[in-house]
Image (cartoon, helix red, strand yellow):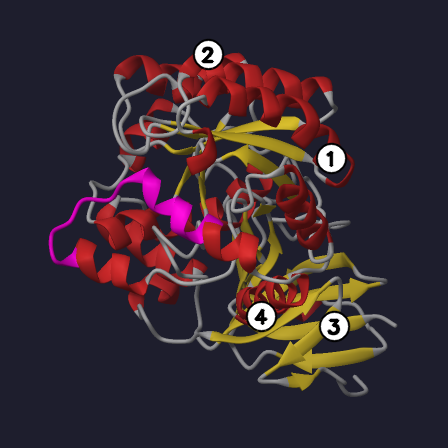
């Protein structure tokens, strides 16, 4: 059954008219139509344009002048875990620096948790994301760090998203502290074998306190050999080899990118590796924000993601990340919204989401606002009035039934 959404105040399509390929540049494909309409048919976008020219459909929904955007695409999240680290956050706010080793406390809680507990928490967070307009998300393992616990983490993640990332190389667990290379062998061998079938991606935390360049390269190579595509936690805590490694490995994304030199920026700008920025982390750790303006001006592709996790950034709000990117990272509202939609899709190598071109998945967000700019203009305000997921709509908590046009 086709559905016409009409009287849209601003329809963000991320598809210029006439349609043309979107360039690598930060918001090169941002496009919006005022006074617009959109038709959904069989879970896909069938038509967009001015409301005055909209075709007939089986049902119609009046947007009442509200803005409609592509669903947010969150390309970096850690949702399979148990426990919480609120005291650690409070300590950081009191002046204690962030260190990667805090992950180990979540590892202990996750290992001890039964599957049902992990599944319930995962599904709760996935629902929380959807309610805030995130219609596509990636989910990493990385809090088990044994063969069995990583395998069940990947299997649980696969229940809620096809974008599953194997992150056995998150940190070296305590039992391997004296033998980190032995742990890398485990990650590249039996653990990978147990996880590869249900994952799409392989990731590694290439950082001081986690894994060095050679270790990270070995993990990525092993993952690629098993058919997984690479992505890298890179240059979060300080300068390092992560970005260069990501580009050399052909990674879909280098995530964090907080501490970059000119060579790192040039490498990202001349490659297809997306610089995924996670401003919620800097908010939650009081670290410097990434220089998004420098990356965009150089021609790099930039994505925004939440990095929802229990330690360094426990938020599932893409709207917050957009507001932080605009205020603290000097992105325009258009650049930030593009990065949270089409940019995230690039980071996941998806061309069916992140835009509302004809043929795209009908994943949409309706805002209780007339334009995309309100995501930064009204920070902290719950603006998602409704969403459509593959054409199935919910507005203000109610299933969309539409009306006869």
Q: For the residues marked 1 and 3, what is the alpha-carbon distance in whole angstroms?
A: 46 Å
For image coordinates 59% across by 78% down, the residue present is 63
Q: Which residues are magenta?
A: 93-107
Instruction: For mark 4, give the secondary structure.
Output: helix
- Is 139 magenta? The answer is no
Instruction: For mark 2, give the secondary structure.
Output: helix
For disc 3, the neighbor class at 10 Å (few under 14, some 14 to 19, many from 20) is many
For disc 2, the neighbor class at 10 Å (few under 14, some 14 to 19, many from 20) is few
Residue nearest the viewer, comparing 5 with 73: 73
Q: For the residues marked 4 and 3, what is the alpha-carbon distance in whole angstroms?
A: 31 Å
Q: For the residues marked 1 and 2, what is the alpha-carbon distance in whole angstroms?
A: 23 Å
Vertically, is 388 above or below 310? below
Q: Nearer the viewer, mark 1 or mark 2?
A: 1
Q: Which residue is the site of mark 3?
A: 4
Instruction: For mark 1, give the secondary structure.
Output: helix
What label does residue 124 carry, if any? 4
Q: Nearer the viewer, mark 1 or mark 3?
A: 1
1 and 3 marks in contact (CB < 8 Å) = no
What label does residue 214 carry, if any? 2
For disc 1, the neighbor class at 10 Å (few under 14, some 14 to 19, many from 20) is some
Quarter the C terminus occupies: bottom right
Q: Can the viewer see residue 304? A: yes
Q: Earlier in the sequence, mark 4 or mark 3?
A: 3
Residue nearest the viewer, comparing 134 with 2: 134
Vertically, is 259 above or below 312? above
């Amino acid at each position: 059954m086709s559905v016409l959404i009409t009287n849209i105040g601003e329809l963000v399509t991320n598809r210029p008219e006439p349609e043309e390929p979107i360039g690598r540049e930060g918001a090169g494909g941002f496009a919006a139509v005022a006074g617009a309409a959109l038709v959904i048919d069989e879970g896909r976008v069938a038509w967009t344009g001015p409301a005055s020219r909209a075709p007939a459909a089986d049902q119609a929904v009046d947007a009442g002048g509200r803005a409609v955007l592509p669903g947010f695409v969150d390309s970096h999240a850690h949702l399979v875990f148990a426990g919480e680290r609120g005291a650690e956050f409070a300590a950081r706010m009191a002046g204690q620096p962030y260190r990667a080793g805090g992950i180990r406390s979540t590892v202990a809680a996750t290992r001890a948790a039964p599957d049902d507990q992990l599944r319930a928490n995962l599904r709760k967070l996935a629902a929380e994301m959807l309610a805030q307009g995130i219609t596509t998300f990636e989910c990493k393992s990385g809090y088990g760090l044994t063969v069995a616990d990583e395998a069940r983490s990947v299997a649980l993640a696969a229940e809620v998203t096809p974008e599953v990332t194997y992150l056995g190389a998150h940190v070296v667990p305590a039992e391997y502290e004296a033998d980190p290379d032995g742990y890398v062998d485990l990650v590249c061998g039996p653990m990978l074998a147990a996880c590869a079938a249900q994952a799409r991606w392989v990731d590694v935390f290439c950082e001081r306190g986690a894994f060095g360049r050679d270790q990270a390269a070995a993990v990525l190579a092993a993952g690629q050999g098993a058919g997984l595509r690479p992505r890298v936690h890179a240059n979060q805590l300080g300068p390092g080899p992560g970005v260069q490694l990501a580009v050399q490995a052909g990674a879909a994304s280098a995530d964090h990118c907080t501490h970059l030199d000119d060579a790192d920026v040039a490498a990202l700008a001349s490659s297809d590796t997306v610089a995924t920025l996670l401003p919620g982390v800097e908010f939650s750790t009081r670290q410097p924000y990434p220089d998004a303006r420098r990356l965009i001006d150089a021609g790099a592709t930039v994505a925004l993601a939440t990095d929802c996790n229990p330690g360094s950034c426990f938020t599932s709000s893409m709207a917050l990340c957009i507001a932080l990117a605009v205020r603290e990272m000097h992105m325009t509202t258009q650049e930030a919204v593009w990065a949270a939609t089409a940019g995230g899709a690039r980071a996941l190598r998806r061309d069916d989401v992140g835009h509302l071109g004809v043929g795209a998945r009908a994943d949409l967000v309706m805002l209780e606002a007339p334009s995309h700019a309100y995501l930064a203009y009204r920070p902290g305000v719950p603006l998602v009035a409704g969403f459509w997921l593959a054409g199935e709509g919910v507005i203000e908590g109610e299933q969309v039934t539409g009306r006869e046009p």
